[in-house]
Image (cartoon, rainbow, N blue to C red):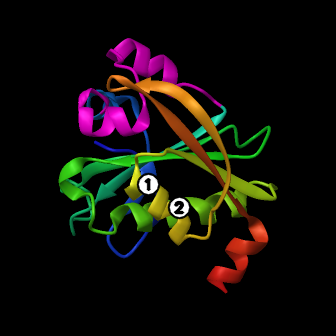
Amino acid sequence: MPGARITEGERITLRTLEKEDLPFLQRAYANPEIRYPLGTPLKNLDQLETWTEDEGTDQFLVCLDGKDEDDEDTRPIGAVFVEDASWRRPELVYWLIPDVQGNGYGKEAVSHVIDYVFRVYDTPAVGAGAYAFNDASRGLLESFGFEEEGRIRMDRFVDGRYVDRVSYGLLREEWRERTE
């Protein structure tokens, strides 16, 4: 059962990531449609548990919730992580399972997490990265007003080739202007 509700959107709920959610994460990270765009190596449950215990990362499970008060109809569909938020500029990492991609759930989830970061942390900006081939992720960031701030050429070996990583940033003031 996914964790406590953090915030709700029109169609998704952000919940705390709990130990019981690790098998969902493991299956997702084993899926090449998620693993390759993220550049994430395979991890077993013990490795995932150690990784998710990082106290410097805020972790959200993206869920579709049923109408029951007891949340029995909750379905996890992805995750959003806020890395390094407590000691430097926060960095967003996000993904959804393939069968729900393209339906606006990612946009809703990332929007709520950006709001969260600027409410909780005294940071002038939030960052994110996407591999150059990941047009969907880059388009999502650009739709929020993220600006390309740099490119790391041949950053990682993903699916048989070296790929560039594009770094993005969104200033607090830019976000405030878009949401007011």
Identified at 33% across, 32% down, the residue is 35
Query: Which quadrant of the figure contains the C terminus?
Result: bottom right
Q: Is residue 4 visible?
A: no
Labels in figure, total? 2
Amino acid tagged 1 = Ser
Q: In the rendered view, tell whether residue 64 sits above or below residue 21.
A: below
The one of 168 and 31 positioned closer to us in this rendering: 168
Circles 1 and 2, Cβ within 8 Å, touching? The answer is: yes
Residue named by callout 2: 141
Give the alpha-carbon distance from disc 1 to disc 2, as whole Å: 6 Å
From the image, give the main secondary structure of the stretch colored magenta: helix
Q: Residues within 10 Å of mark 2 (few under 14, many from 20)?
A: many
Residue named by callout 1: 137
Secondary structure at numbered mark 2: helix
The one of 30 and 150 positioned closer to us in this rendering: 150
**Residue 33: in magenta span:** yes
Q: In the rendered view, tell whether residue 41 sits above or below residue 38.
A: above
Q: In the rendered view, tell whether residue 142 sits above or below residue 93.
A: below
Q: Which residues are magenta?
A: 29-55
Amino acid tagged 2 = Leu
Which residue reaches farthest bottom? 180
Identified at 33% across, 69% down, the residue is 104
Q: In the rendered view, tell whether residue 82 sits above or below residue 27.
A: below
Identified at 36% across, 76% down, the residue is 10
**Residue 73: in magenta span:** no
In the rendered image, residue 51, in percent from the top left (x then y), is placed at: 50, 22
Q: Residues within 10 Å of mark 1 (few under 14, many from 20)?
A: many
29 sits left or right of 171 in the view: left
Q: Quadrant of residue 19?
A: top left
In the rendered image, residue 13, in percent from the top left (x then y), is placed at: 38, 61
